[in-house]
Image: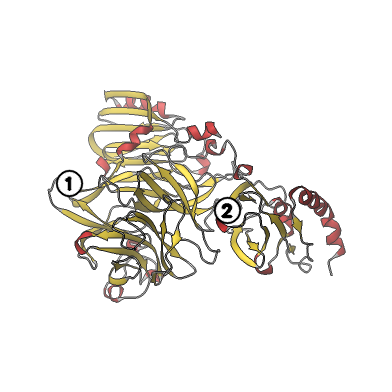
Amino acid sequence: MPNPQFVKSTLPHLRTLLGFVSALAVTVRPLVAAEPSGAAELVAMEQTLSVSGSHLIVPVANYPKGDKGVLLGIYDGATVVQTFNVALPQGSDAFWLAAYPLEPFGLKGKQIRIAPVDGGRAPVACLASFERIKVGPAEDALSPTDYAQPYRNQFHISSRRGWNNDPNGLVFHDGKYHVYSQHNPFGIFWGNMHWGHFESTDLVHWEEKPIALFQKTVKDMVFSGGGFVDFNNSAGLGANTQFAAFTSTGRGGECLAYSKDGGLTFTELPGNPVVKHRGRDPKVFWFQPGKKWFMVVYDETPCAETEAITQTVGPKERASAHLAFWESKNLRDWEQTGAFTDADRLAVFECPELFELPVAGRAGESRWILLAAQNRYFVGQFDGRTFHKESGPLGTGHGAFYAAQTFSDVPDGRRIQIGWVRTDTYLQRFPDQIVNQAFTLPHELKLRDTADGLRVSFSPAVETEKLRGEILSEENDLTPARANELIQKCRGELTETLIEFSDAKPRHLVINGIDASFDGRKARIFTDRTFNEVYGDDGLSYELRKRSARDFDSTETRLTVETGTVRSLKIFRLKPIWAERVRSN
């Protein structure tokens, strides 16, 4: 029997809710009793909504990751259409609104129920925010200021609202570059993994498209993977069909899906998962010498390779970590051909890539590059079955950087990479922050012969020059004092700084409150609002550094050089890629 005192205390909420119901044709089931005395007050919540609009509008609070989350379900009758974890705001806590598309579920015109999953209950403090959940157009959640928020990076890709991590499915298809990504539409922390989608014709200006791949439920999320074009109709679905490869967390394997509408929506192959194993993050590529498709994928199944090479780096639970290779003629039937690991297990952990690069300056000579989520790489050969290392792991983790991926099918043959930038939240200052995380600028990978051997270099794609606006400063043969004076023009600006010294040594530099130091003779530095990208030593050094929450307002800019000459300094003001979107909204 309900507790009378509890019922009395909730009557004002119920009266408010009934008015809300009358206006929106919403039906609410009566609440049940609270937990016994001494436990947190938990109640059953449920409402019925008419799907007369395109999106489910849900209030979201930015509580610490994993804290105060509620597992809700969307029900079509007794059928679970979707489940999602969301931190519903409690009391007067700050919140923002998420807009989740309902049209892909075929619910238009139906009545749906929203309730905690499996009869679960939620804190009574969430009642008011639960009552705010409604169906409506996406515009009910969005704001004209979304792209102008001070924590929004202005020339790097990020979701309009929510969380994004690993870039997925990078592919060039029919004149457009596609970047998909791990995306949580219900929070600014990791969870509810879908594939978000961005599209561009120039690698610089991006348009966010609707969610492309949906988790089935939180028990079967869509994890990372790659994209490619089935140019020769291997799968029998038509030449030039765009594909996505991803990990299904609920089915325990790698799945393939294809698109017939330019990468906006995908249909799974009926035989999914096409590969079942203990692993994730498939990347599919065409191997011309063997005229077949290969998949390189992270795996944690013990194998001969992990037994033969003793682990020296990485946690014990990664002892069996390796990269596995699978082949297929038709993209439907797959057979494993080999595996690769290293004593440094962290160098083969998650999000693998395998591709061939020509050696710059050596006509007809090339090597294969194998890398994983840290972006430290191996140089060697791929024989159509497995990878054979010549050197590695090489390079660094690049700072606030992870899980990069390169584009498939770029028509001019360039190997262009985009990575995930692991940024901070700024919740002390912006408790209703609407977006978290971002992606790097596109950069081109080249294999160069150096005094230390073959090394991969990272250089901003030529398209990034489209970001340039006016020149803030340009001067040659400067004293350190004069260079420090001119570089002050970076304060409070979005900038690209090109600086070259007369000799090579460690350089100590801060631009607009973010460390931009590097080793070498010259660097190209892109400074956005919350992080920068520092390409040093002709791209042989590449680092990302992020702004700390405590220094959010810092515009400190200084160059520390005791002696020597600054051969050249050039500073561009950069143009936001969101400017038109801000004005149009």
Find residue 360 and name its label. Answer: 1
Location of the N terminus by quadrant is bottom right
Image quadrant of residue 202? top left
Find residue 371 and name its label. Answer: none
> Seen in the image, is 365 located left or right of residue 238?
left
| Of labels 2 and 1, the one closer to you | 2
* Res 238 visible: yes
Residue bearing mark 2: 103
**Residue 64 location in percent, x, y?**
58, 54
Check the image and report above or below for 38 versus 266.
Answer: below
Q: Residue at x 41, y 38 (%)?
A: 205
Q: Residue at x 43, y 37 (%)?
A: 155
**Residue 493 location in percent, x, y?**
44, 30
Check the image and report above or below for 300 versus 368.
Answer: below
- Front residue of 403/271: it is 271
* Res 560 visible: no
**Residue 435 location in percent, x, y?**
53, 46
Please, what is the three-letter code of the amino acid marked with disc 2? Glu
> Pointer 2: residues within 10 angstroms few (<14), some, or many (20+)?
few
Q: Looking at the image, is mark 2 or mark 1 earlier in the sequence?
A: 2
**Residue 209 location in percent, x, y?**
48, 46
> Seen in the image, is 52 located left or right of residue 472?
right
Estimate the spatial distance between the alpha carbons at disc 2 and disc 1, rounded to whole Å.
49 Å
> Seen in the image, is 134 located left or right of residue 447?
right
What colour-coding does the image apply? Answer: secondary structure
Please, what is the three-letter code of the amino acid marked with disc 1? Ala
Q: Residue at x 17, y 46 (%)?
A: 360
Q: Residue at x 79, y 62 (%)?
A: 30
Helix or strand or loop: what does disc 2 sit on? helix
> Seen in the image, is 492 located left or right of residue 174?
right
Image quadrant of residue 486? top left
